[in-house]
Amino acid sequence: MENVKKSAFRFDDFFINEVQTKIENRHFDGEIELGMNLSGSSVLRNSKSQLELTIILRVEAEDYFNISISTVGLFTTSFVEGDEKFESYLYTNAPAILFPYIRAAIASITAQCGIPPVRLPLMNLTEFGQKLKESRTIEE
């Protein structure tokens, strides 16, 4: 049997820090237009081997509801800063790994609020990753 090579980038944990919902109208059928605002921050820790990625997503359907969710993903890496893979994993792959968890949380929360579950569309997070890179914090 072949040994499996250990990944240099590991997803350790996901949790929700805060959720805010406001339901204005529970009765809507069919398609609704969603507005989404994605923001976040990243913190590199412990000699840059740990990444804490915070993503805040606000979803709004005018006259129906708005939801804000703040989530955190924790990652560990053995890549070093300056490595091409370091940038790719931290600022492209990490948000892409977290987004399905956020989508599932939004669907579950909306269903539990008594409205049809909101299924967020898939998103290209490349631009978001660039914003994270520009606003990162490094803690030793």
Image (cartoon, grey):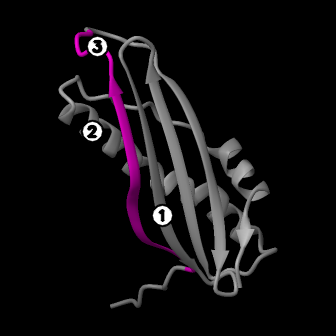
The span from disc 1 to disc 3 (Cα, nearest Å) is 32 Å
Q: Which residue is mark 1?
A: 73
**Circle 2 sits in a helix, a strand or a loop, which is it?**
helix
Between label 1 and label 3, give the one nearer the viewer. 3
Q: Which residue is mark 3?
A: 25
Q: Looking at the picture, how far across and down is residue 114, in whole percent?
A: 18, 26
**Circle 1 sits in a helix, a strand or a loop, which is it?**
strand
Q: Amino acid at mark 2?
A: Ile
Residue at the (38%, 39%) spot, across then down:
20
Q: Is residue 22 magenta?
A: yes
Q: Amino acid at mark 3?
A: Asn
The span from disc 2 to disc 3 (Cα, nearest Å) is 15 Å
Q: Looking at the picture, how far across and down is residue 99, in whole percent?
A: 46, 48
Density class for disc 3 (Cα within 10 Å; few <14, some 14-19, many ≥20) is few
Instruction: Please state if 66 lies on the left or on the right of 52 as rendered.
Output: left
Which residue is nearer to you in this view: 81 or 48?
Answer: 48
Ranked by sequence position, the earlier of labels 1 and 3 is 3
In the picture shown, does residue 91 fall above or below 64? Answer: below
Residue at the (48%, 85%) spot, across then down:
5
Density class for disc 2 (Cα within 10 Å; few <14, some 14-19, many ≥20) is some
Q: Looking at the picture, how far across and down is residue 1, in whole percent?
A: 33, 91
Instruction: Please state if 11 lies on the left or on the right of 46 as rendered.
Output: left
Residue at the (39%, 89%) spot, across then down:
2
Between label 2 and label 3, give the one nearer the viewer. 3
The span from disc 1 to disc 2 (Cα, nearest Å) is 19 Å
Q: Which residue is mark 2?
A: 109
| Magenta-tinted stretch | 8-28
Q: Amino acid at mark 1?
A: Gly
| Main SS class of the magenta portion in the image | strand
